[in-house]
Image: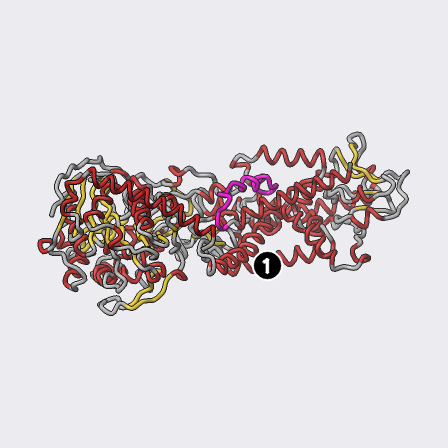
């Protein structure tokens, strides 16, 4: 080992140790949830805290990040960075949440953490004004580019019905683990934009989905072999109308919630049920969730799942 | 002393050239448009941008010329500095003898004809001729379309190996603009490699105009006949070919004040002197007898008259055809204002972060060739972005605040229901609604549980987000039609926000 590498490792190690000590402290303080926190839940729902605190609670209940991210792995985090909007507008994933996940993955020993999205508005202002570029970099993560076709590779979707192949971002395909981090939004095309809809940001040609039965294509895309290890829905701020872009803060509510599951259909079902309390949105209207349930990509029958509900 | 003056001129001119070049090739936006203010100090932009508040700069440039002569041409003009570099490089390949410059008489008729015509066109409402003659704009097009293309291609090559370098698309480039810039590049390069500042003293209308002023400037190049030995050394280094040794005169009209000649003189015979008391003819190489002068003046006058008439006829006859695709940048007030004030320097196109601006082909008519046009097949105009209006030095695109931009209607979206995916395939889509930043497109119930777009053209600003993303083929279902004169869109009426409190998870 070279001296430089030794020093690097030593410094990183001591930082990691320090941070894990702190996390331990935190969990000790709020011990009541710790009783069942052995990680056998299918779905975690948290409400009433800041994004970082809610994430910490949820991942702890899920069994800790180390269950999903192993040392030396390449991790990709895919938030929604679709629009040139500030965090207050709830058009993009909360940057504090992204930052917390990046840090956690690095603490778990991830070799690198890349954050990207195929944006709708021009990518540079999206990355910048969403606050996600700065947050990810400050947390030690990397920014991935997704604005040109060369960053994508064709993959087959053997289980797809309307879409049997598509170009998916290379970062996803080359990652060891990837985490899907959507924001909960109203969407007048797909009806709701949650975890399944967020996968459209890993695809190059989105017009294909729009012109070939959008709802079916979203469900087809969720059958991708390379599934996200975790789906973490940011509902700290949610967009209840004019979605998915939104117009102003009048479109935004701040319920301070977060949902986490390995099942992309289940987490969408839970998030839509939550959303339904703000604006009438029956699950039956969100067809891609129902199609995915029928295709057995996951389940929208929450009654059969072990759910942990946490209020902070 | 003169050596210092010359070196000072070289350093300043290179710094200005660098700053201006950066304005056109900074595709990674390292400088965050910080240098774009430099562009306003160019002569034609200052003249055309009077409406945008550049009168002060124009007066400064004219005063500069009144006092010091054509220092603009030697120091401020990027094309001038470029030509000096070309000449220097070309000299490396020339024999010592071939490097020598020689005095040439002025091509007065050609110079003034082009100059008068170019400015007359502008007075009559078209910048079409200035577009092709203005040195700054030609330099801009060369930098943006040739060097910029090289930087983009080079960057893309590197981005294959270095992950932190983002790739760039080529949406800002068109074959027409690349080709025309290449032709200008070849013409200017060959002319300067062959005979120094030939372009500046025959074609450039700014050179001709400032030259006419320069004849009467306070400081002029002057040969002291008493000291001069007619060795021709100064004349052989004169890139403007304006030192007439037999008559021991310097043509201060064509002299670009590069100060190359003075340091080489071994007898201190040629100097840069304050000559307010002297009439220009006294030290002009163009001293001519009265009858000859009258003849010459008559010819010049006739040329000018002809130029003005031609421009007038052109402007009268050539009414811009209304073209639905002629979508002019927000801030330009519409194609007509753009065509009066734009010289297609491509500062806006090179800096457009969305890459929606590209050089026009015939959208604005032939006289609007290469001017910026929004192409919604390539991209769409970012709602929060005002970069083109900030970098435009000409006042062709007036500066806009974000609030002004948000209601500047450059066109209106037109919805073709029959082509829409929702109506045609009876499946969900909503791509246009998603992209609409003005909330002009809302989704309304349609058929069995579907939603279909509805456009409110009074709110629409014509940004093209909807047209760009519309997946319907072969014809898009929503298309933006240009506003011949830009309008102000209504603001979206905001509903009161109701804060809702929820205590349960809902499942």
Q: Residue at x 65, y 36 (%)?
A: B62
- Looking at the rendered structure, the secondary structure element under dot 1 is helix
Q: Residue at x 66, y 41 (%)?
A: B12
Q: Quick check: is B37 in the magenta stretch?
A: yes
Provide residue A312's location: percent of width, then percent of height.
18, 38
Q: Residue furthest left?
A: A303
Q: Nearer the viewer, residue B201 or A45?
A: A45
According to the picture, the residue beneath numbered tag 1 turns out to be B182
| Residue A127 seen by the camera | no
Q: Nearer the viewer, residue B29 or B199?
A: B29
Provide residue A257's location: percent of width, then percent of height.
20, 43
Magenta-colored span: B27-47
Q: Residue furthest top?
A: B277
Q: Residues within 10 Å of mark 1 (few under 14, many from 20)?
A: some
Q: Nearer the viewer, residue B290 or A158?
A: A158
| Residue A29 seen by the camera | yes
Provide residue A159's location: percent of width, then percent of height.
22, 68
Q: Quick check: is A19 in the magenta stretch?
A: no
Provide residue A181's location: percent of width, then percent of height.
27, 50
Left or right position of B11 against A155: right
Left or right position of A296 against A22: left
**Render colour scheme:** secondary structure
Q: Residue at x 32, y 48 (%)?
A: A107
Left or right position of B349 against A250: right
Q: How many marks?
A: 1
Chain of the residue on which disc 1 is drawn? B
Locate the N terminus of chain B and report the quarter of the image it occupies. Answer: top right
């Amino acid at each position: 080992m070279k001296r430089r590498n030794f020093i690097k490792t030593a410094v990183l190690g001591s930082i990691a140790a320090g941070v894990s000590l702190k996390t331990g402290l935190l969990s000790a303080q709020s011990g009541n949830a710790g009783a069942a926190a052995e990680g056998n839940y299918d779905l975690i729902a948290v409400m009433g805290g800041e994004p970082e605190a809610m994430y910490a609670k949820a991942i702890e209940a899920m069994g800790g990040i180390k269950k999903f991210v192993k040392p030396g792995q390449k991790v990709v985090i895919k938030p929604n960075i679709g629009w040139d909007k500030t965090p207050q507008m709830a058009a993009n994933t909360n940057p504090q949440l992204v930052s917390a996940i990046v840090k956690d993955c690095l603490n778990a020993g991830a070799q690198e953490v890349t954050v990207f999205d195929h944006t709708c508005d021009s990518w540079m202002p999206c990355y910048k004004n969403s606050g996600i570029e700065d947050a990810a970099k400050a947390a030690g993560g990397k920014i991935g580019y997704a604005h040109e076709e060369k960053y994508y590779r064709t993959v087959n979707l053997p289980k797809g019905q309307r879409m049997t192949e598509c170009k998916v971002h290379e970062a996803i395909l080359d990652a060891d683990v990837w985490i899907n981090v959507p924001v909960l939004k109203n969407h007048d095309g797909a009806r709701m934009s949650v975890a399944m809809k967020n996968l459209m940001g890993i695809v190059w040609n989105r017009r294909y989905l729009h012109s070939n039965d959008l709802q079916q294509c979203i469900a087809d895309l969720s059958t991708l072999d390379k599934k996200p290890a975790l789906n973490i829905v940011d509902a700290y701020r949610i967009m209840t109308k004019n979605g998915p872009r939104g117009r102003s803060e009048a479109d935004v509510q701040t319920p301070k919630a977060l949902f986490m599951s390995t099942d992309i259909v289940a987490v969408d079902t839970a998030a839509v049920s939550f959303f339904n309390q703000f604006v009438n949105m029956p699950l039956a209207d969100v067809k891609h969730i129902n199609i995915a349930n029928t295709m057995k990509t996951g389940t929208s029958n929450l009654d059969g799942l072990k759910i942990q509900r946490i209020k902070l | 002393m003169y050596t210092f003056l010359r070196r000072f001129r070289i350093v300043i001119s290179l710094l200005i050239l660098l700053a201006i070049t950066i304005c056109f090739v900074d595709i990674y936006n390292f400088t965050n448009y910080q240098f774009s203010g430099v562009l306003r100090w160019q002569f034609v932009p200052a003249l055309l941008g009077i409406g945008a508040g550049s009168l002060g700069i124009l007066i400064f440039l004219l005063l500069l010329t009144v006092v010091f002569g054509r220092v603009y041409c030697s120091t401020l003009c990027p094309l001038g500095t470029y030509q000096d570099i070309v000449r220097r490089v070309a000299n490396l390949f020339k024999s010592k003898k071939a490097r020598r410059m020689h005095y040439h008489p002025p091509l007065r008729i050609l110079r003034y004809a082009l100059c008068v015509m170019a400015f007359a066109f502008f007075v009559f409402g078209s910048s079409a001729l200035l577009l092709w003659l203005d040195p700054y704009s030609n330099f801009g097009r060369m930098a943006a379309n040739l060097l910029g293309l090289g930087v983009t291609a080079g960057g893309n090559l590197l981005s294959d190996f270095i992950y932190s370098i983002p790739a760039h698309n080529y949406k800002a480039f068109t074959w027409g603009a690349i080709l025309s810039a290449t032709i200008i590049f070849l013409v200017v390069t060959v002319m300067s490699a062959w005979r120094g500042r030939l372009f500046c003293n025959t074609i450039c209308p700014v050179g001709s105009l400032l030259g006419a002023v320069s004849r009467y400037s306070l400081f002029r190049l002057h040969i002291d006949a008493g000291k001069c030995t007619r060795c021709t050394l100064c004349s052989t280094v004169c890139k403007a070919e304006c030192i007439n040794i037999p008559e021991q005169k310097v043509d201060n009209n064509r002299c670009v004040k590069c100060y190359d000649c003075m340091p080489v003189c071994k007898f201190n015979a040629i100097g840069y002197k304050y000559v307010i008391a002297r009439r220009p003819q006294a030290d002009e190489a163009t001293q001519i007898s009265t009858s000859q002068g009258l003849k010459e003046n008559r010819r010049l006058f006739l040329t000018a008259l002809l130029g003005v008439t031609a421009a007038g006829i052109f402007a009268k006859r050539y009414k811009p055809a209304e073209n639905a695709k002629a979508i002019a940048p927000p801030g330009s007030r519409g194609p007509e204002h753009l065509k009066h004030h734009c010289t297609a320097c491509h500062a806006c196109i090179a800096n457009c972060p969305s890459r929606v601006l590209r050089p026009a082909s015939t959208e604005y008519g032939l006289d609007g060739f290469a001017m910026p046009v929004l192409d919604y097949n390539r991209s769409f105009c970012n709602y929060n972005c005002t970069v083109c209006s900030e970098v435009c030095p000409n006042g062709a695109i007036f500066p806009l605040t974000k609030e002004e931009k948000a209601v500047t209607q450059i066109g209106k979206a037109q919805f073709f229901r029959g082509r829409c995916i929702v109506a045609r395939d009876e499946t969900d889509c909503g791509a246009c609604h998603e992209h609409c930043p003005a909330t002009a497109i809302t989704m309304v119930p349609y058929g069995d549980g579907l939603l279909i777009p509805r456009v409110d053209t009074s709110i629409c600003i014509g940004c093209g987000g909807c047209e760009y993303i519309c997946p319907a083929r072969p014809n898009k279902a929503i298309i933006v039609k240009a506003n011949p004169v830009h309008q102000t869109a209504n603001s979206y009426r905001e509903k009161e926000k109701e804060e809702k409190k929820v205590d349960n998870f809902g499942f």
